[in-house]
Amino acid sequence: MSVNNKLPVKHKGVVIGFARVDPEDFAAFGHINWCLEKNGHVYTRTNGVYKTLAREIMNGAEHVKHMSHDLLDNRKRNLRACSKSESNRHTSRLPKNNTSGVLGVCWIKEKHQWRAAVSVDNVTVYLGNFANLEEATRARDQGAKKHYGEFATLNSELEKTRAKKI
């Protein structure tokens, strides 16, 4: 039964949440048992084959991104088929060695400044050095918009997403 086009997501047979989908996708995938992966993706196994809900909705696209970073929102307006490099650009995870707490900004000890940068086709594009973290973060987000387009992950968006989860 549809609860506003939300598919139940289970762990060990117990419903632990719901994945939002469009009405036509609820009709197509509502009969399948969906589970939640450790990384937050909704998936199922059919005849031993692993399938994510997002890829099924996007007709088997190799890479699919949730534009809002909400992995339970599988409505088509939130999903984009993309290349591997576009997928990598649209990340919400900070690298393990990140010390600034924001994407694309690091502290340059020798200069006592923050440096903003983006990576384009495995080449680092430096956007400048800044006296404070806020200026560097703004510069990085502007650079991400310029180089990544709709696949840019903005630090301001991540703050909103992180605030929702707390």
Image (tube, helix red, strand yellow):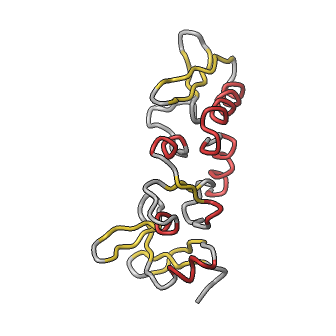
Q: Residue at x 60, y 72 (%)?
A: 21
Q: Residue at x 61, y 53 (%)?
A: 67
Which quarter shows the C terminus?
A: bottom right
Q: Position of residue 53 (x, y in %)?
A: 48, 68
Name the outermost residue toward the bottom. Answer: 1
Name the outermost residue toward the top. Answer: 110
Residue nearest the viewer, comparing 46 with 155: 46
Q: Position of residue 75 (x, y in %)?
A: 61, 67
Q: Residue at x 49, y 75 (%)?
A: 9
Rendered position, 46 above or below 42:
below
Rendered position, 46 above or below 146:
below
Q: Tally the numbered discs.
A: 0
Q: Residue at x 68, y 27 (%)?
A: 139
Rendered position, 107 above or below 4:
above
Which quadrant of the view contains residue 27? bottom right
Q: Position of residue 17 (x, y in %)?
A: 54, 74
Which quarter shows the N terminus?
A: bottom right
Which quadrant of the view contains residue 25? bottom right
| Left or right: residue 75 compared with residue 28 | right
Residue nearest the viewer, comparing 161 with 72: 72
Q: Position of residue 107 (x, y in %)?
A: 56, 21
Rendered position, 21 above or below 112:
below
